[in-house]
Image (cartoon, grey):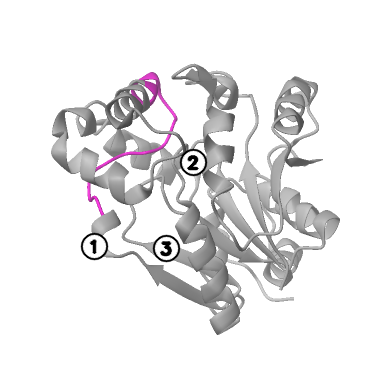
Amino acid sequence: MRAVTVITARLASSRLPRKPLVELRGRPVLEHLVDRLRLATRPEAIVLATTRESEDDELEAAARALGIEVFRGATRDVLVRWRDTARATGADLLVGCDGDDVLCDAAHVDRVIERAAETGADYVSCAGLPFGAAPTGYGAAALERVCALKTDTDTEGQGRFFADERIVTRAEVVAPQNVRHATARMTLDYPEDLAFFEALLEALEPYEEPPPLERIVATLHARPDIVAINAALQEEYWRRFNERYPAVALGER
């Protein structure tokens, strides 16, 4: 099975413009994420999946400068972009790490791939990780099926398209207790999220390579003041998410 890690990102953003290239402790967010994902041992490549919009030319250049591959596809239809990424890279499994999720866990990238290989599942999620730390596995064959069945062309909030177990087989990776945190918000969507990451990475320094999730979670348990920086945003995030991305039904053809 050929597995590829996919970072899904673009520069258009209303709440925090140009998020992937925003500087965080002196380096772009994208660089922090790529450095973490390089610690995974099972993927055969890391690919940035971005859009064909001219504004993302700069993002492509930044990704190539970091030594990762780039695929450019549909703007709003993220599922088609992923399907076409899988086709272009010959991947059997994409392990998705959103470009907002600065501290996505490389160890769980490997665990998702292992779980997909063990079970043959089309969709592999992670349970128990802090919000923003979890990768998700998407089988290429399932992407083909879902793209053939769906009617939506705006497919952000992608997990809702993989809920029907008549169409997609599912499996789960359960996180161990030492990497669990029930309230930490580790995703980059608002200015307060950037302040959270700045404070967290400052608390974690010095380090020579990306700190493991165990150390990150231990720091967050020890520093509730850091968790509090953006914790209040979570309710608003889910309210907005549920309004914009309702459940979908994939009709069989």
Q: Three-letter amino acid code at disc 1?
A: Gln
Crowdedness near tag 3: few (<14), some (14–19) or many (≥20) residues, C-alpha within 10 Å: some
Q: Splitting the image into 4 quarters, where does residue 154 fall?
A: top right
Q: Is label 2 or label 3 in front?
A: 3
Q: Which residue is mark 1?
A: 177
Residue 126 disc label? 3
**Lower sequence index among marks 1 and 3:** 3
Q: Please give the name of the residue rendered at 42% of the width and 69% of the height, measured from the top-left corner.
A: 173
Crowdedness near tag 2: few (<14), some (14–19) or many (≥20) residues, C-alpha within 10 Å: few
Residue 187 lies within the magenta run: yes
Q: Please give the name of the residue rendered at 53% of the width and 48% of the height, measured from the top-left corner.
A: 157
Q: Which residue is mark 2?
A: 244
Q: Please give the name of the residue rendered at 45% of the width and 39% of the height, measured from the top-left corner.
A: 210
Residue 185 lies within the magenta run: yes
Question: What segment is highlighted magenta in the picture?
Answer: 180-194
> Picture coordinates of residue 230 (x, y %)?
28, 29
The answer to whether residue 239 is above or below residue 91 is above
Q: Splitting the image into 4 quarters, where does residue 227 fall?
A: top left
Residue 83 disc label? none
Q: Is label 1 or label 3 in front?
A: 1
Using the numbered discs, state the Cα–Cα distance from disc 1 to disc 3 in whole angstroms.
13 Å
Report whether 102 appears left or right of 35: left
